[in-house]
């Protein structure tokens, strides 16, 4: 089995550099789906990253998603030089028309920024804008909205500069219950001394919702905010 993997690795090494983007992206798919994909981690180096960056521009959306998945798994061990290339190439897809591709690019960038925080100022606003555009997009499915909201909740906790405007997170009448809850969680995570009054004002309105299950959830989030901010009672009286 070891020798079979070595033979496959040798073949994949050549296919990853193939000039045909369909061939190269399929080689990436094989690596992602292989049960011993860790054996192939040594295939990814600066040369392969550079070649896949070119492939990305010519590949279809399916191929682009596969390459982003590979980059995401590689992000944890990328050198600073490799990370700069990945950040620059991923950023080119932040405004992609396909929400899945744009979100995948954001995932790679966010993973790299946790390791190289000095680059945050260059990319945080662009990532935030990209995720906000997907979140409020008229053609974005509720499931995709939920995925973006969970990403933002995690991002806000680690990188507060990556967050959407409050207006993009407000609960809408046609929101599914799981989206409504995620929006409230994000609002709570976004809260700071400057935005606290606006967020509490919004949450107190949601606490009056006819959906008792949702209203109770909102009240519990208000309670969490009370435990986070000293002197919040005075703020609540102003709401």
Image (tube, rainbow, N blue to C red):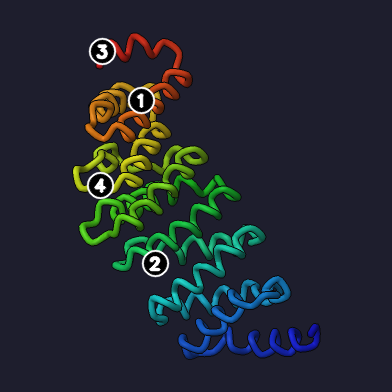
Q: Which of disc 2 and disc 3 is earlier in sequence? A: 2
Q: Which of disc 4 and disc 2 is earlier in sequence? A: 2
List the residue tagged with mark 4.
Answer: 175
CA–CA distance in space, label 3 to label 1 = 17 Å
Asked whether disc 3 touches disc 4, contact meaning CB atoms under 8 Å apart, the reply is no
Q: Quadrant of the N terminus?
A: bottom right
List the residue tagged with mark 3.
Answer: 238
Q: Nearer the viewer, residue 219 or 234?
A: 219
The residue drawn where x is 29% and y is 31% is: 212
Q: Which of disc 1 and disc 4 is earlier in sequence? A: 4
Q: Quadrant of residue 101?
A: bottom left
List the residue tagged with mark 2.
Answer: 101
Q: Nearer the viewer, residue 238 or 115?
A: 238
**Residue 219: numbered disc:** 1
CA–CA distance in space, label 2 to label 4 = 23 Å
CA–CA distance in space, label 2 to label 1 = 36 Å
How dense is the environment of label 3, judged by Cα within 10 Å: few (below 14), some, or many (20 and up)? Answer: few
The residue drawn where x is 26% and y is 35% is: 211
Q: Nearer the viewer, residue 124 or 212?
A: 212
How dense is the environment of label 2, judged by Cα within 10 Å: few (below 14), some, or many (20 and up)? Answer: many
Q: Quadrant of residue 161?
A: top left
**Residue 185 in the image: x percent, y percent?**
40, 36
Q: Which of disc 1 and disc 2 is earlier in sequence? A: 2
**Residue 234 in the image: x percent, y percent?**
33, 9
Query: What SS does tag 1 mark?
Result: helix
- 186, above or below 219, in the image: below
CA–CA distance in space, label 3 to label 2 = 43 Å
The residue drawn where x is 54% and y is 79% is: 29
Q: Quadrant of residue 218?
A: top left
Number of the front mark, 2 or 1: 1
**Residue 22 in the image: x percent, y percent?**
46, 87
């Amino acid at each position: 089995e070891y020798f079979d993997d070595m033979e496959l690795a040798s073949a994949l090494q050549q296919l990853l550099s193939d000039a045909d983007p369909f061939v190269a992206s399929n080689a990436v798919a094989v690596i992602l789906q292989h049960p011993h994909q860790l054996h192939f981690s040594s295939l990814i180096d600066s040369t392969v990253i550079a070649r896949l960056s070119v492939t990305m521009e010519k590949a279809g959306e399916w191929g682009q998603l596969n390459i982003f998945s590979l980059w995401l798994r590689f992000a944890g061990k990328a050198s600073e030089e490799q990370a700069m290339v990945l950040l620059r190439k991923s950023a080119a897809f932040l405004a992609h028309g396909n929400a899945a591709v744009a979100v995948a690019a954001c995932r790679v960038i966010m993973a790299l920024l946790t390791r190289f925080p000095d680059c945050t100022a260059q990319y945080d606003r662009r990532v935030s804008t990209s995720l906000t555009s997907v979140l409020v997009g008229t053609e974005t499915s509720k499931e995709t909205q939920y995925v973006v909201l969970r990403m933002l909740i995690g991002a806000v906790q680690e990188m507060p500069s990556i967050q959407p405007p409050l207006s993009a997170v407000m609960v809408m009448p046609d929101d599914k219950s799981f989206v409504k809850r995620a929006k409230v969680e994000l609002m709570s995570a976004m809260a700071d001394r400057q935005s606290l009054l606006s967020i509490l004002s919004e949450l107190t309105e949601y606490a009056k919702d006819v959906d008792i299950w949702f209203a109770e959830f909102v009240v519990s989030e208000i309670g969490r905010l009370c435990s986070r901010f000293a002197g919040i009672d005075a703020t609540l009286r102003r709401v």
